[in-house]
Amino acid sequence: MRLFLVAVMALWPAWGLAQDFTSLKQPGVVALMRHALAPGTGDPANFNVQDCNTQRNLDDRGRAQARRIGDMMRDAGVEFDAIWTSQWCRAKDTATLLDMGEVREFPPINSHFAGRGDRAAQRQQTLETIAAQPQDERLLLVTHFVNISALTGQGAGSGEIIVARRTDDGELEVVERIKVQP
């Protein structure tokens, strides 16, 4: 029994990295990804969306995490018809480092943390824009904890992907969570 436990403990890290991305291959899936690891909370008082030097950004682990998630999705054969990102540098950098295709800035998924935006209006605009896309398109939105929470009722850790499907009433229903450790 002791040998079995030692073997399990030795394999545990590898099991933690194994991911099943099958749900991301389904037609019509909406994947909401929180930007990769960017230590801290919020942004500095001098925040300017046009200046990365005034923002909380990805660190080395966050950049590696974004690349690893992209590698894993590509290796699994995942493709997206559209990739939208917040205009915050940590989200844009995550979306770019995933290397999954053309990335388009989409202001309605900019963070509305600490009064920087309008939660209700951004949520509504995001849902309307999603609903206007062809039903079978697979969408990836790289955004922030508060936006994912507003859209799904669930938060997400750094680099976590909340996989959802569109409902008949224009909402998003969570079907899976995919987490890759930093």
Image (cartoon, rainbow, N blue to C red):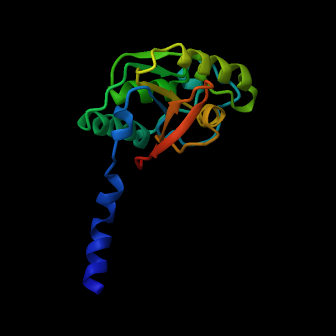
93 above or below 18?
above
Q: In this view, does 120 lie to the left or right of 82?
A: right
Q: Can residue 72 be seen in this view?
A: yes
Q: Which residue is drawn at 60% across and 20% down?
A: 126
Question: Residue at the right extreme?
Answer: 115
Q: x, y percentage for residue 134?
A: 45, 15
- Residue 179 appears at what percent x and percent y? 44, 47
Q: Quadrant of residue 124?
A: top right
Task: Give 101 or 172, whichever is nearer the viewer.
Answer: 172
Q: Where does the image place residue 46, in percent across and percent down from the top left?
A: 68, 24
- In the picture, measured across the screen, residue 98 lies left or right of residue 123, that is left
The answer to whether residue 59 is left or right of residue 43 is left
- The answer to whether 59 is drawn above or below residue 143 in the figure is below
Left or right position of 152 against 179: right
Quarter holding the N terminus?
bottom left
Residue 145 lies, in percent from the top left, at 60, 37
Find the residue positioned furthest to the front.
Answer: 168
Residue 16 placement: quadrant: bottom left
In this orientation, which residue lies closer to the viewer: 166 or 138? Answer: 166
Decide if residue 33 is in sight here. Answer: no
Residue sitting nearer the eye, 48 or 65 = 65
